[in-house]
Amino acid sequence: MRILLLALRRLAASLPTLLLILVGLFLLLQLAPGDTVDALMAQMGGGDPAMMEQLRSFYGLDAPVLVQLTRYLWRLVQLDLGFSAIYGKPVSSVILERLPVTLLLMGTSLSFAFAAGMALGVLAARRVNKWPDALISTLGLIFYATPSFWFGMMGVVVFAIKLSWLPAGGFEDIGAGHTGLARLADIAWHLVLPVTTLALIFLATYLRIMRASMLEVLTLDFVRTARAKGLSQTGVLLRHVLRNALLPGLTLIGLQAGTMLGGAVVVESVFNLPGLGRLAYESVVQRDLNTLLGIVFVSALLVILVNFIVDLLYAKLDPRIAAER
Amino acid sequence: MALLQRYLRSPAAVIGLVLLLLVIAMAISAPWVFPRDPLSLAGRPLQWPGANPNFWLGTDNTGRNIAAQIFHGARVSLLIGLVATAISIGIGIVVGALAGFYGGWVDDVLMRITEAFQTLPNFILLLVLVAVFGSDIQTVTIAIGLVSWPPSARLTRAEFMSLRSREFVQACRVLGMRDARIIFREILPNALPPVIVYASVIMAVAILLESSLAFLNLSDPNVPSWGNLIGAGRGVLRVQWYVSAIPGVAILLTVLAVSLVGQGLNDALNPRLKSR
């Protein structure tokens, strides 16, 4: 309970930040050439100035900036993100349609990167300065330096085109009309390449953090005590060292949530996945600023939410945090 | 000198330095080795590497010489990386120094802004900036600098907070120096080394960010950037995959070089941490 309170307090502290982001972005978008009405008119192939004025006052775009800002924030409180002129739907429903794909992609990649990074980091730390350590560290560095989209494209060349083991893109095979479990398997099959691409980039960071913190924890006194008690090597590693070494990796999840979302934009474009990232890209190209602002809002919310969960997990792993207050 | 010796002791750092020098050499020699505009038609499109002795890395789908684009692309990538890093470090140092030196409400306000920038995903903010201000090369470079300053601000702030109550700072105050002089002439030089080392990370990320933008066709199309070439090769990925593969390797090696040099510098500056 105390943990929850503590995390909630952190959550409340991020509200001013969120407000700052929204005000800042709203003012920034005022600088953008053209507004919703221009975008609408461009889609309809032009219109007369009188009608444009009418539309502007209909959308409230003729009011002073400050009034517009207040209206915008008030609508946000009611979870109304505005209307997308391009998609002809409320922005919130456009985003909600795309959100699950991105969450699935990010969640799976994150779990995979975290698990694999942990395992490899432990392996490297156990054989520190021997060849497995050198090999793992070098691979990590190379993954880190690779542009994710290039990695994805080369994956497509090898596994989809040359070997034809995996599909080259898309979220599912709609034509096949799968239902139930078969559909799930189909989606999973389509996500193998995107998830690997996104995960490999982040794996490197987890690996290095994990290796460093394992090495640090291994030198502490309580590890020696655990060994002296006669625990097996694996027991010491899993029950005592790993739990303590996990904390920095966990912090990293919170710090990297935003980077991962950014990576998802690019990976979704490579594999034609109908996710939030692809929507962000499309709304930039089509100058759909309402949708873009909505996406930024949702992604900031996502990052804050991830950090909230990380706070909870952190206190779970390290009881000292909850006990301090 | 001792620093150089310590640096050269690590093989990874030496490899990084050699790679980086190679990329720099490519960037400098580009106008002499390939004097023609790298974006102009050079020959029949889609010739495989080695098929024509004139184009040893082949030609892309619009008949442009890939080798020329790689050489000129090295200039673009390094330039974007350097300028964006300078901008980002510049903002970070000023924000971090003011926040760390004054503390109190200045710190609160500046850190809230830093947090706001950190909560927004880098790349999405970059997309917004490009959507608003357009995507010519100057705008893209400035935008990359604008989205990547928060870590250097935090780093500078931490250094300033530990330095501001040291005796030499108190001595400066007793001498009656103005705040600006204490911050930038006295404390900053002491706070700089970790920030400079971190610059290599920012530069690596800046190069990757630009190539991602270019890949999405949102960077400047009139510049021979590696990301643009990868994006162009996407249409012929099925058969002529080399068009995208070659510039990707160039990006990989450059980012790897920058990271290795940064890591090597870090180890050389903090020899005690090396054993980890």
Image (tube, coloured by chain):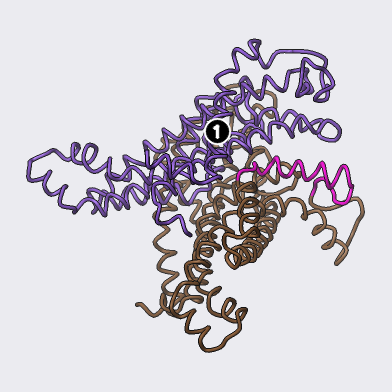
Chain colours: A brown, B purple
Query: Of A320 and B78, which appears nearest the observer?
Result: B78
| Viewport quadrant of the N terminus of chain B | top left
Q: Is residue A68 left or right of residue B236?
A: left
Q: Position of residue B165 (x, y in %)?
A: 19, 54
Residue that mark 1 sits on: B20
**Quarter of the image holding residue B51?**
top right
Up/down of A77 relative to A84, above or below: below
Question: In the image as oriented, which residue stretches furthest toward the top?
Answer: B36
**Quarter of the image holding residue B223?**
top right
Identify the secondary structure beneath mark 1: helix
Q: Position of residue A2 (x, y in %)?
A: 42, 79
Q: Is residue B212 visible?
A: no
The residue depicted at 73 percent of the width and 51 percent of the height is A194
Up/down of B212 relative to B99, above or below: above
Q: Is residue A165 magenta?
A: yes
Q: Is residue B265 magenta?
A: no
Dominant SS in magenta = helix
The three-letter amino acid code for the residue at tag 1 is Leu
Which chain contains the residue that carries disc 1? B
Q: Is residue B73 visible?
A: yes
Magenta-tinted stretch = A145-170
Q: Position of residue B252 (x, y in %)?
A: 64, 38
Query: Of B208 and A235, which appears nearest the observer?
Result: A235
Up/down of B48 relative to A242, above or below: above
**Quarter of the image holding residue B95?**
top left
